[in-house]
Image: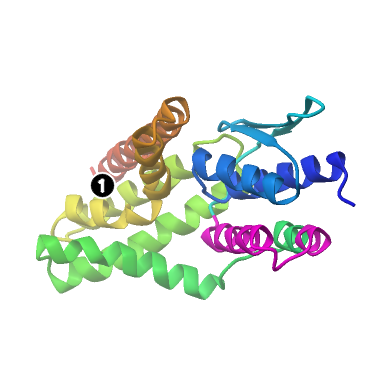
């Protein structure tokens, strides 16, 4: 028999994995409430960017889960959604659901560094097609984008501060683009910098902010939008400082 405590704990875990993996708050609330209904309880869920509140209406018990940080992972998001559908359709027992959620929560889903580096380079090259850039600038955008991405990843794990990683990534891109132009190796520093910034752009955060606002989850949408804007500002500030340093170095 499913106890109220077990259900609330599992729902909190499901909500946390969904929210930290990139789900919008409406998806978190709907999934948690469907799981509660399938388990035979009346569950109410309210999710924000910093906490998830889950209550069982019969005994008025409330379970609060504090959210710390986001590691966007669409594969975890898809797996949790698939499990919740299986459970609500009766194809998965509660015990099996608990085991699978624990497995997904603890699993580190990542790509090989070689794949991530190559992807960062290819993403950096794509906008250069719109600029009709030369082959040399295309190659430089590929390399500068990889450098900016690697510095941002290093800063994410080694430097304290929520926006240090995008700022340092932007600084690296701005510095290298400016340096290449000053040394007459690159033809257009602006094109190289804009293209090489693509791996750093907070695309998921911006997309989710629009979805939240359109879905009338205004507070969560505005929080996501502010986070995306500040991240973009950190990237832009880093680029400006990096470009200025490159000019100073080549005077």
Residue 212 in view here: yes
Q: Main secondary structure of the magenta part?
A: helix
Which quadrant holds residue 137?
bottom left
Q: Per the image, is 216 magenta?
A: no
Q: Which residues are magenta?
A: 73-99
In the image, is 46 to the left or to the right of 144?
Answer: right
Q: Name which residue lies at 65% across and 64% down.
A: 86
Residue at mark 1:
250
Residue 70 in view here: no
Helix, strand or loop for disc 1: loop
Q: What percent of the width, then of the height, locates residue 14?
A: 68, 49
Check the image and report above or below for 124 versus 17.
below
Q: What percent of the width, then of the height, locates residue 51?
A: 64, 31
**Closer-to-camera residue (190/224):** 224
Q: Quadrant of the C terminus?
A: top left
* Neighbours of disc 1 within 10 Å: few (<14), some (14-19), many (20+): few
Q: Per the image, is 97 magenta?
A: yes
Q: Name which residue lies at 18% across and 50% down.
A: 190
Q: Name which residue lies at 41% across and 27% down.
A: 218
């Amino acid at each position: 028999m499913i106890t109220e405590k077990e259900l609330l704990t599992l729902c909190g875990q499901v909500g946390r994995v969904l929210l930290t993996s990139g789900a919008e708050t409406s998806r978190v609330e709907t999934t948690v409430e469907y799981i509660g209904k399938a388990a035979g309880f009346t569950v109410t869920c309210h999710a924000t960017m910093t906490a998830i509140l889950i209550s069982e209406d019969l005994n008025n018990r409330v379970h609060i889960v504090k959210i710390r940080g986001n590691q966007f992972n669409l594969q975890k998001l898809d797996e949790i959604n698939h499990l919740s559908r299986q459970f609500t359709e009766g194809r998965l027992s509660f015990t099996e659901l608990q085991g699978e959620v624990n497995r997904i929560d603890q699993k580190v889903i990542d790509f090989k560094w070689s794949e991530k580096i190559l992807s960062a380079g290819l993403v950096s090259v794509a906008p250069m097609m719109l600029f009709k850039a030369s082959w040399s600038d295309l190659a430089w955008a590929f390399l500068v984008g990889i450098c900016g991405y690697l510095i941002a990843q290093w800063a994410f794990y080694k430097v304290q501060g929520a926006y240090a990683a995008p700022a340092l990534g932007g600084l690296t891109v701005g510095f290298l683009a400016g340096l290449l132009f000053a040394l007459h190796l690159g033809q257009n520093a602006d094109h190289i910098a804009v293209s090489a910034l693509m791996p750093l752009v907070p695309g998921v955060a911006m997309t989710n902010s629009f979805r939240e606002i359109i879905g009338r989850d205004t507070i969560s949408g505005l929080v996501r939008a502010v986070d995306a804007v500040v991240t973009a500002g950190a990237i832009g500030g880093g680029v400006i400082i990096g470009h200025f340093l490159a000019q100073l170095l080549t005077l």
